[in-house]
Amino acid sequence: MDKNIKAIVVKETMEWGIEVIDVKIRDIQLPENMRRMMANQAEAERSRRARIILALAEEQAAGKIIDQSPSAIKLRLYQTLANIASEKNSTILFPFPEEMFPKNVPKK
């Protein structure tokens, strides 16, 4: 950056007979809105990378584990439901087949 600025200054001052020996940037003050924009962009990039890593991990796990175990897809469903419930503070209802409940349950 120093070299680029020096080249511009040398070019502009050459006709005046001024010799520029060195250019150093000591302190750069960015406007607050530019700092916020840069921070937002960095946060978005971190979030994007995290989503990509999570998606790759999900893909690897799905390919290896779900193919090997019939109950793995159920566990994945329960994990997804738990994630949804914790993020949205929701109540999730999903039906169970009647076959899952015992038919002759003694009443008290």
Image (cartoon, helix red, strand yellow):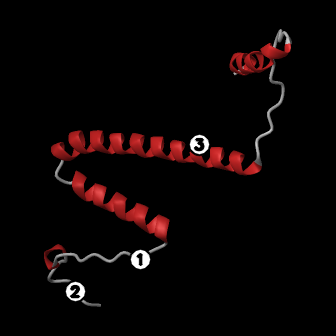
On the image, the x and y values in percent for residue 8 come to: 72, 21
Q: Which residue is mark 3?
A: 42
Question: Label 2 crowding class (10 Å Cα cut-off): few <14, some 14-19, many 20+?
Answer: few
Which residue is located at x 22 percent, y 39 percent? Answer: 64
Query: Quick check: 32 above or below 92?
Result: above
* Dot 3: element: helix
Give amino acid for label 2: Pro
On the image, the x and y values in percent for residue 35 come to: 71, 45
On the image, the x and y values in percent for residue 90 come to: 44, 74
Which residue is located at x 68 percent, y 19 percent? Answer: 4
Q: Is residue 40 left or right of residue 75?
A: right
Q: Which residue is mark 2?
A: 106
Q: Residue furthest bottom?
A: 108
95 or 20: nearer the viewer: 20
Q: How many marks?
A: 3
Give amino acid for label 3: Ala
38 or 83: nearer the viewer: 38
**Residues under numbered marks 1 and 3 in contact, where contact means CB atoms less than 8 Å apart:** no
* Dot 2: element: loop
Q: Quadrant of the C terminus?
A: bottom left
On the image, the x and y values in percent for residue 33 come to: 71, 51
Q: Counting residues from the N terminus, which is met first, the one under dot 2 or under dot 3? A: 3
**Residues under numbered marks 2 and 3 in contact, where contact means CB atoms less than 8 Å apart:** no
Structural distance between the alpha carbons of marks 2 and 1: 30 Å
Q: Counting residues from the N terminus, which is met first, the one under dot 2 or under dot 1? A: 1
Q: Which residue is mark 1?
A: 91
